[in-house]
Image: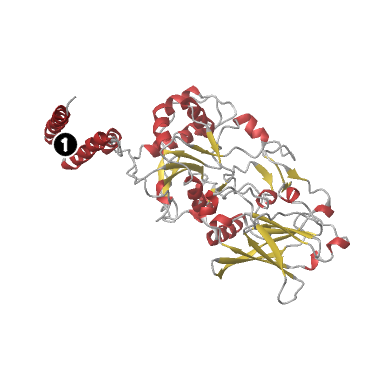
């Protein structure tokens, strides 16, 4: 083909494009016209940068999120859907208000009916909405409650609100304590334009066997990306009837997600807390992952001695606000002069052992709790250490306060609280440790970018007390040096 023929061909192509362009001018607003023009230019240059059909679809609907994908995920991109009821809300409201910020967090508590007319809904709580009537749906689980149908549909009703700027729908209960900054840290790792179903299973094996290891348990909370929600709402009501025999709303959601073919993405910071008794052993050896949620806050024992449940969670949240990423993060070190092993669960507790234990032993949770359904000592989805031998138990120190130490660091103080784990061994090995009343811990604030790297437990070291006071031990938490390991001699 001659060069003149090629030129003529290009002119004819642009003449055709221009004729289409002029016709569209008569029917499209100028803004869409401009987008169409750039779309054609990108096609011609074979470097498409804009999905025109996708834009048209979402520009003309009310349910599309108006989101700038160049902006990193933040709390404004998350819509909470909390399952509540008029009966449970008055007692559980204080826990929700520990993390809820009316001008920051957005979402709703979904109620089974309108609250009493003579009561003013508090501005410190999430706004409420009343769930639609679900009496027409099937529910055949003989040991369950048909309120599960209502809870299943919270996702759909939240989606159909058509709120803008939503990337993630996060479902939880009104007895779930969320840690929003850490939730953002976790969700920001994932592309919200893909189909994601993120959460965790139960701690108790018996619960996972019944409800499936693939279920992201609803009490611990789960996150669904906007595109997955968009697909789920199309089949959700049918799923509710197809899986009428399933007990819970979270089970039904997982069944629907399975029909779409999406797999569960497990994040270890979501906690269903399907355990009975003291949560101490789990929190003192938290996984190397940001703390995202704690469920069953009014079922387990209070977290701190001599405190109510609400007071305990309030203290934990105050520490979290000082350094969100570090809350409950474990650090392990040895004092080789005194043959001590020390485990720090930042913002919660310190364990002091009068012997040298391996890191493998210290990272295993103490068995201070029982299974959810049978109240048995096992099995759990993680290993536990027995606390039956009093001489194998640590001296335990609980958080007293956290304060800023300047230079991007915090200083937290932990006090000994007597016989916290029942009666302790009083042998010679405990003489020196029992003289320690306080443990002071300094630590740099844990920045969010560290969670984008391979997870590694941070290191610590015992510092000499400048005042020479035996009743206080000073510990410095820091990042590990290259080739550093927690290895006893």
What residue is rendered at 43% in x and 51% in y? 75
Q: In front here: 278 or 464?
A: 464
Percent x, y of residue 474: 69, 68
Residue that sits furthest to the front in the current view: 2
Task: Examine the rendered structure and indicate whether residue 466 appears above or below residue 117.
Answer: below
Q: In front here: 353 or 312?
A: 353
Q: Is residue 185 visible?
A: yes
Q: Is residue 425 left or right of residue 368?
A: right
> Disc 1 designates what residue?
28
Percent x, y of residue 17: 16, 31
For label 1, the SS is loop
Residue 398 falls in which quadrant of the image?
Answer: bottom right
Task: Examine the rendered structure and indicate whether residue 217 appears above or below residue 70.
Answer: above
Q: Is residue 179 left or right of residue 489?
A: left
In this picture the colour scheme is secondary structure
Percent x, y of residue 400: 64, 65
Q: In front here: 13 or 382?
A: 13
Pick the quarter of the image with the C terminus.
bottom right
Q: In front here: 80 or 442?
A: 442
Residue 274 falls in which quadrant of the image?
Answer: top right
Residue 131 falls in which quadrant of the image?
Answer: top left
What residue is rendered at 73% in x and 51% in y? 359
């Amino acid at each position: 083909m001659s060069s003149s023929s090629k030129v003529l061909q290009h002119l004819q192509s642009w003449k055709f494009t221009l004729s289409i362009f002029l016709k569209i001018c008569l029917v499209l607003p100028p803004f869409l016209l401009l987008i169409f023009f750039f779309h054609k230019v990108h096609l011609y240059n074979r470097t498409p940068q804009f999905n025109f059909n996708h834009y048209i679809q979402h520009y003309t609907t009310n349910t599309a999120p108006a989101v700038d994908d160049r902006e990193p995920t933040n709390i404004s991109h998350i819509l909470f859907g909390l399952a509540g009821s008029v009966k449970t809300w008055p007692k559980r409201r204080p826990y929700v208000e520990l993390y809820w910020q009316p001008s920051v967090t957005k979402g709703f508590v979904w109620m089974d009916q309108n609250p009493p007319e003579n009561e003013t809904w508090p501005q410190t709580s999430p706004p409420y909405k009343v769930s639609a009537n679900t009496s027409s749906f099937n529910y055949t689980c003989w040991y369950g409650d048909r309120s599960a149908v209502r809870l299943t549909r919270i996702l759909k009703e939240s989606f159909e609100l058509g709120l803008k700027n939503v990337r993630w729908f996060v479902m939880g209960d009104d007895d779930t304590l969320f840690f929003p900054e850490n939730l953002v840290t976790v969700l920001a790792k994932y592309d919200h334009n893909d189909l994601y179903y993120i959460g965790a299973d139960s701690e108790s094996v018996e619960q996972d066997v019944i409800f499936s290891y693939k279920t992201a348990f609803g009490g611990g909370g789960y996150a669904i990306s906007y595109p997955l929600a968009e697909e789920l709402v199309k089949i959700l009501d049918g799923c509710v009837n197809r899986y009428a025999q399933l007990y819970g709303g979270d089970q039904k959601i997982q069944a629907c997600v399975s029909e779409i073919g999406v797999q569960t993405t497990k994040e270890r910071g979501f906690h269903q807390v399907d355990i009975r008794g003291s949560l101490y052993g789990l929190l003192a050896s938290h996984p190397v992952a940001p703390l995202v949620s704690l469920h069953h806050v009014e079922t387990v024992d209070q977290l701190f001695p001599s405190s109510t449940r609400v007071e305990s969670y309030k203290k934990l949240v105050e520490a979290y606000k000082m350094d969100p990423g570090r809350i409950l993060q474990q650090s392990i070190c040895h004092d080789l002069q005194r043959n001590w092993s020390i485990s720090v669960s930042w913002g919660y507790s310190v364990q002091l052992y009068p012997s040298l234990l391996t890191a493998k032993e210290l990272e295993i949770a103490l068995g201070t709790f029982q299974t959810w359904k049978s109240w048995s000592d096992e099995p759990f989805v993680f290993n536990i250490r027995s606390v039956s031998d009093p001489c194998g138990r640590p001296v335990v120190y609980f958080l007293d306060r956290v304060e800023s130490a300047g230079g991007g660091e915090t200083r937290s103080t932990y006090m000994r609280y007597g016989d916290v784990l029942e009666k302790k061994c009083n042998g010679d090995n405990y003489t020196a440790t029992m003289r320690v009343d306080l443990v002071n811990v300094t630590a740099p604030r844990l920045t969010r970018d560290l969670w984008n790297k391979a997870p590694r437990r941070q290191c610590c070291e015992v510092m000499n007390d400048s005042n020479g006071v035996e009743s206080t031990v000073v510990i410095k938490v820091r990042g590990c040096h290259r080739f550093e390991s927690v290895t006893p001699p």
